[in-house]
Each structure stands twice: as structure tokens, then as C-alpha cells.
Amino acid sequence: MSIEKCRLVDVPKISNPSGNLTFIEGGRHIPFEIKRVYYLYDVPGGAERGGHAHKALHQLIIAMSGSFDILLDDGYQRKSYHMNRSYYGLYLCPMVWREINNFSSGAVCLALASAPYDESDYIRNYDVFIAAARTNP
């Protein structure tokens, strides 16, 4: 896959003087059914998360609060996104290396995933990822 298939996705935002509401429906707003939801929070200053790729998993990453940066790498090119709004997310397709860093104080990173946790779907070594990405473009 390539990072060109990764993209920002606007999700519905219903504005109201008493507070905004956003909802996401799998298969409608994002190109997969949601099978798992998790979130990162209390990330210490200077810490990085991610540092892996997935063989088959699709994800949508949203900054629910605060901000952070996501660096994507498909083995040929890199692209960075600054995430700081809760009404858009970054769609990540399989076989894209991701690194998440530059977390602001109080940042909350929500991830919607297409499958339950499966350690065998992870590629945690960058050199192994590069070899796999370049033999399977």
C-alpha cells in the first residue's frame, strides 16, 4: 500500500450552543467496520508511540483532545500530519509505518481499528517493514 491511500477524513460535526457532537459509523464514514477502539493518554512529554506497521489492519486516528503529530512512511515516501481537531481523523491503511509524537499536555489519541488485537499483524522492526514494503508494493 502507499501513503497516498491514507487521508484525512472529515467526520460529522453537529454544532450546538450547549456543546458539539461528532459520531462515526464504520462502513459509512470510514472504509471499514469498527472491531476495536482504544485510546492513548497521559503520554509523557517527549515520548513517542507507534513505531510499527500493520500487515492487514485499517485504522482511523483522531485527536480527541490536545494535539500530536503522525509520521507515515510507506517505504518510498514519508508524510506528516498534525492532528488537533476532534472532528477529523487520519485513515491509515495496511503496510504503512506510523510514528506518533509531539503530544501536547493532556492529549488524547483515539484509534478505531478494523480488527481485534492480533500481535501477528504487527511489524515492529523498521528494516523488516522496509523489506516487506519494497517487495510487495
Image (tube, rainbow, N blue to C red):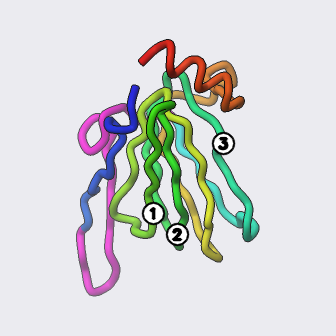
How far is disc 2 from disc 3 in space, using C-alphas? 18 Å
Disc 1, SS: strand
What is the magenta range?
14-35
Q: Position of residue 110 (x, y in %)?
A: 52, 54
Assess whether mark 1 and mark 2 are in contact (beta carbons under 8 angstroms).
Answer: yes
Instruction: Point out the residue furthest to the front here.
Output: 76
Q: Is residue 117 visible?
A: yes
How far is disc 3 from disc 1 in space, using C-alphas? 17 Å
Bin the neighbour count of mark 3 within 10 Å (Cα to Cα): few under 14, some 14-19, many 20 and up.
some
| 61 up-or-down from 21: above or below | above
Q: Main secondary structure of the magenta part?
A: loop
Disc 3, SS: strand
Identify residue type, mark 3: Gly
Q: Position of residue 73 (x, y in %)?
A: 50, 39
Nearer to the camera, 39 or 102? 102
Q: Quadrant of the N terminus?
A: top left
Seen at 26% across and 45% down, the residue is: 29
Q: Nearer the viewer, mark 2 or mark 3?
A: 3
Nearer to the camera, 116 or 4? 4
Bin the neighbour count of mark 1 within 10 Å (Cα to Cα): few under 14, some 14-19, many 20 and up.
many
Q: Quick one: label 2 or label 3, which is nearer the N terminus?
A: 3
Identify residue type, mark 1: Met
Q: Is residue 119 magenta?
A: no
Identify residue type, mark 2: Ser
**Residue wearing tag 1:** 83
Q: Which mark is residue 67?
A: 2
Assess whether mark 1 and mark 3 are in contact (beta carbons under 8 angstroms).
Answer: no
| 14 up-or-down from 61: above or below | below
Q: Quick one: label 3 or label 1, which is nearer the N terminus?
A: 3
Report the label total: 3
**Residue wearing tag 3:** 51
